[in-house]
Amino acid sequence: MRADGPLLEVTDLVKHFPIASGVMRGREIGRVRAVDGVSLAIGEGESLGLVGESGCGKSTLCRTVLGLVEPTSGSVRFDGRELAAASRRRPPAIRRQMQMVFQDPYASLNPRKRVSQIVGDPLTIHGVATGAERDRVVGEALDRVGLAPAHGDRYPHEFSGGERQRIGIARALALDPRLIVADEPVSALDVSIQAQVVNLLEDLRDELGLAYLLVGHDLGVVRQACDRIAVMYLGKVVEVGPADAVCSTPIHPYTRSLVSATPIPDPGLRGRGDRVVAEGDAPSAASPPPACRFHPRCPRATGLCAELEPQLVGHDDGRFAACHHPLTGSAASD
Amino acid sequence: MIGYVVWRLLGAVALLVVVSALVFAIFNVLPAADPATLRAGKSATPEQVEAIRESLGLDDPLLVRFGRYMAGVFTPFEGGPLNLGTSIFQNNEPVLAIVADRLPATAFLVAGAVVLWIGIAVPVGVASALRRRSALDRATMITTLAFVSAPVFWLGLVALYLFADDVGLISVFPGVGAYDEADGLLAKAWTLVLPWTVLALGTAAIYARYIRAEMIGAMEEDYVRTARAKGVPERRVVLNHALRSAITPVVTLLGLDLGLLLAGNAILTESVFNVPGIGREVVTAIDRSDYELIQGIVLFGAFFIVIANLIVDVVYAYLDPRVRF
Amino acid sequence: MAPPLLAIEELRVGFATEAGTVRAVDGVSLTVESGRVLGVVGESGCGKSTLAMTILGLTRGEGAEVSGRIVLGGRDIAALDESALRRLRGAEAAMIFQDPLASLHPLQRIGSQIVEAIRAHRTVARAAAAARAAELLREVGVPDPERRLREYPHQLSGGMRQRAMIAIALANEPRLLIADEPTTAVDVTVQARILALLDRLRRERGMAVVLITHDLGVVAEVADEVAVMYAGRIVERGPVERIFADPQHPYTWSLLASVPRIDRPPARRLAQVGGRPPSLIAPPAGCHFRPRCPHEFDRCSAVPGLEPRAGDPGHLDRCWLDPERKRELREAAASAGIEDGR
């Protein structure tokens, strides 16, 4: 286990998608600022949850970190080595150490391949193992996710959603990565199956020292599975901190509105007075509000918020938030 | 939207130039017929042929000749606003005049056929979709398959064999060549009944199957379920909700088919029934290597197709508000 | 006490397939009173959506075999013919669906979709209907309603679309509203506002609401009564406080224990249920949950009736275990699963 520096370090990552006008191709009339300056770090064996609502840029961030999409600017360092620069001809060794699990268990497995092929393909592609050795690794991976080696002979359609998601995780594990990026891995699953997959991820973290970046929109799942949580809004990270702290005493007003909007399975807590929900709808990432992006919807906004963009600054206990008027301590109500 | 249309029109002009260049190249590079010889006639002397060649400027480089042609296209002359050259075999009649003369017959043929095939395809397609796997549906599928597979000229000949008043078993409709002889719109329409039917049946078959498939898809959509949940009468659900969605791609198809047909794609039907339209004209022109006429017709055809494409795209944006330029 | 607005009795819905009949709903009985919300909660395949669709007869065209009674306002609507049922749909009883982008017609303006709902049941001039449509949009919290009427669904945000769907459902003052996963497809902050809207409308109009969802948090937020469905049957039913505080069925325990909560430290391990839901073509004999239940015993080979075993007549369950044993088992599971910290 390396002690020097984080495993994954993202610095000022920016990804803009140009909007081309329909008439004269190539003339850009705007940009979708999907990721607009995001910095975060994940240490070895650490789990970071990235939460945000639709349009916040979390999926784009995932893809940019993995090199599936080339960033507009900024850097992604894995194990100290710059990735963003060598995006096309990335050294395969690095690719092996960072794997991805996708959201849709029905679309992310090739229906024409057997499970053993699906899980074994990464080994073949990277030339890591062939033949009997490969079969052994595949068997181990399947076993680790709770599937029998015999399941390798079957096709994806013979499995349920939760099982398919586990196959996807087995595929990610085949190369023995140090980091897994999971983009909404449980959103398409039923609650009791979600639990299986979440438990699996936690077990892998505990047993293998696997680090993961878990992207999701469900604060409950993310809190359960992750040590730390980062909250994204319109392309920027607005708060980062230990999972428990972020959920119980949010600093940023948007985090608070997310927390108070998340329903709790306890009717006794109904109508709790601290519910504060953001006004209006989220604006489009093509035209984010100036300065603090949340200010048009924020109950605490002042003139300053519309003029000066708040930076991500440190608060106590390893917490960061980007807000001019943070909620501090346990002041969860105004 | 205006910007888009202008952009497309510019593109259309460019495309037409390219098409005419291609046609020009084909006819002036292929050894099939020497225009000078063709013009001179059978009993010409080599000197006469040479003289004609010089007068036509056939010895000039290809590019120069093409340039002259294109310049000529846009020069008005006493034959009309565009000079597409003159036909070799039709007494030097301006090509434009010939096309203009033949177009109405084709247009009439196509218009009637369109009405007929839409009138058949929509009800049949919708009914089949609503009663899937019923006897009606199976009958429809088999019949449409038959008509899609049957060659148009065969259908035409069978129709004549059965129903033509001069050679047919049951003397009902006018036979071959009757269009020319008929006087007045109604009489001409009567002569076109068989050609309409023949042209329409094959296309109706395709459209019926297509509409059926689209309707089946549309009826499964969530918004149809919502309409029913609102208590909307089933007939309205089928027409205003499902058919409304299903018809949009069909309109696109129709526009493109119209463009093709006006460009001369009704060749087979016109030939079998001897309807004096563009399709038949191009057949005779090819037969005689009347290259100026062919070139003119091809150019005209390209124009129709390009315009049809543009109209179809604009209409689609009108029908589907999600599509915007 | 006034009779319930909606009373479903022994409803069974089966779909004939090549492999056999799929018993999507296998003997469901429940009641809803005016002004109250019944939350029907369950996972995919449990039959809750089929149940919702069958109430309004929307499964009729799909080859479904339906038996049982559905009594709305005193009459059995399961026995109505199609035209009578159509008069009821969108008027006395209305339904909203999960994905508003797919459930609204993409090629029709919002205004005409609302107007259509109005004019399907009343003879009203178009202009008057349009005015009413704007009013409805305003009532469901859509700003600038006149402009929205002329827009198409894809031009609205997800939350606005769902509000438009609610406006359509309310157009004719229904007494019963069926909401099939109305907030599953929207963000959590939008969900909170939509649920608050539904709650307000329900109270103002005294509507009965059947809320179908897989989200226990949603149920806890808005439901008065809860019915838990599994494999086509209701396995537990009762007031929402009782279901959450004192669940009686092992499936309910595991559901509750597998939901991560943000108001408590994370569980050491979320409860997970092994195996898969049973095939609805050939479900297991006896209790449907038996193959996956860690506490099953020999009695479970007979189907447990839905009965009040916990002492409260309003709280019914389908589990043969006696209440004492249930409490023991539940407490054991709870203490094993949830510990403070990690």
Image: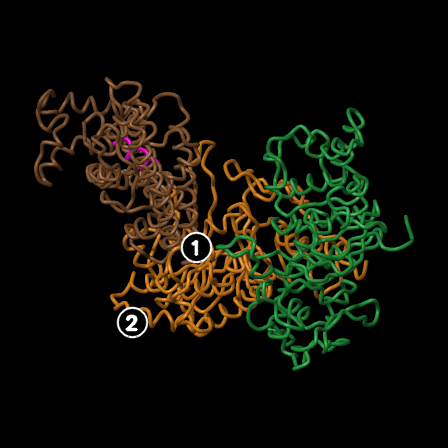
Chain colours: A green, B brown, C orange
Q: Is residue A43 left or right of residue A323?
A: right
Q: Magenta region, mostly helix, strand or loop?
A: helix
Q: Is residue B207 magenta?
A: yes
The magenta-colored residue range is: B200-209
Residue, disc 2? C128
Residue B166 x, y percent position in the rendering: 9, 22
Amino acid type assigned to the residue bearing label 2 in the image: Ala
**What's the chain of the residue with tag 2?**
C
Closer to the camera in the image, B79 or A173: B79
Q: Is residue B52 left or right of residue C27?
A: left
Closer to the camera in the image, C220 or A143: A143
Residue C203 x, y percent position in the rendering: 46, 73
Residue C64 x, y percent position in the rendering: 39, 42
Q: Is residue B22 magenta?
A: no
Amino acid type assigned to the residue bearing label 1 in the image: Tyr
Question: Where on the picture, by quarter, is residue A286?
Answer: bottom right
**What's the chain of the residue with tag 1?**
B
Q: Is residue B324 above or below residue B280?
A: below
Q: What residue appears at the point 60 percent right and 60 percent down from the top-left corner?
A: A31
